[in-house]
Amino acid sequence: MPTALPADYVFETARYDEEKGRLTVCWSRGMDSITLSFEQVDNAAVETVNIGQPETYDERLYDLPFGETVPEGYRQAFFAPVFAKDDFSLEIVCARVISYNGDSGDTSTPRGNFSVLYDGVSVQFDGRGTPDEIWEMFASISEPVSLQ
């Protein structure tokens, strides 16, 4: 679990799916939320993003709606990127956690989604916070261990 969260986030829920070997934890701050899912995986079966190809993951390179602007060959990696722990950096977070002109009543907090592959554990992020806050949160996660 992270030991640092963006300011004012509070624990909301946690659930463990024994069948999938997945622990999901949610925090909230008003209308904003962060969900982290920790899942036991076989590293060899997970394809990670080549960080030398930002066109496959960097949201800043495309216009909304992404479904119309991201080339078809990049869509799988783009919409659900998995980064190797050793490749993960603040620059990656900046490429994936951005502000959108939201719907009326939505917050202006940057949002994003991605996964980080540790040794045998995938940590999926879906939520809101500044890139610096999200980077600090991931930096505070000690190496995940087996969920079984």
Image (cartoon, grey):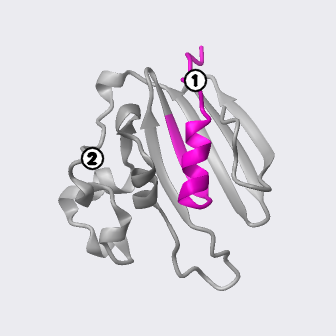
Say whether residue 143 is magenta: yes
Among numbered discs 1 and 2, the one appearing first in the sequence:
1
Q: Secondary structure at mark 2?
A: loop
Most extreme residue toward the bottom is 104
Which residue does the numbered mark 2 point to in the structure image? 51
The image position of residue 107, as x and y in percent, is 67, 75
**Which residue lies at the image location 66% right of the left edge and 36% below the top edge?**
2
Residue type, mark 1 in image: Glu
Q: Where, quadrant-wise, is the C terminus in this rendering? A: top right
Magenta residues span 123-148
The image position of residue 32, as x and y in percent, is 70, 63
Which residue does the numbered mark 1 point to in the structure image? 19
Q: Secondary structure at mark 1?
A: loop
Q: CA distance from mark 1 to mark 2?
A: 32 Å
Q: Where, quadrant-wise, is the N terminus in this rendering? A: top right
Figure label count: 2
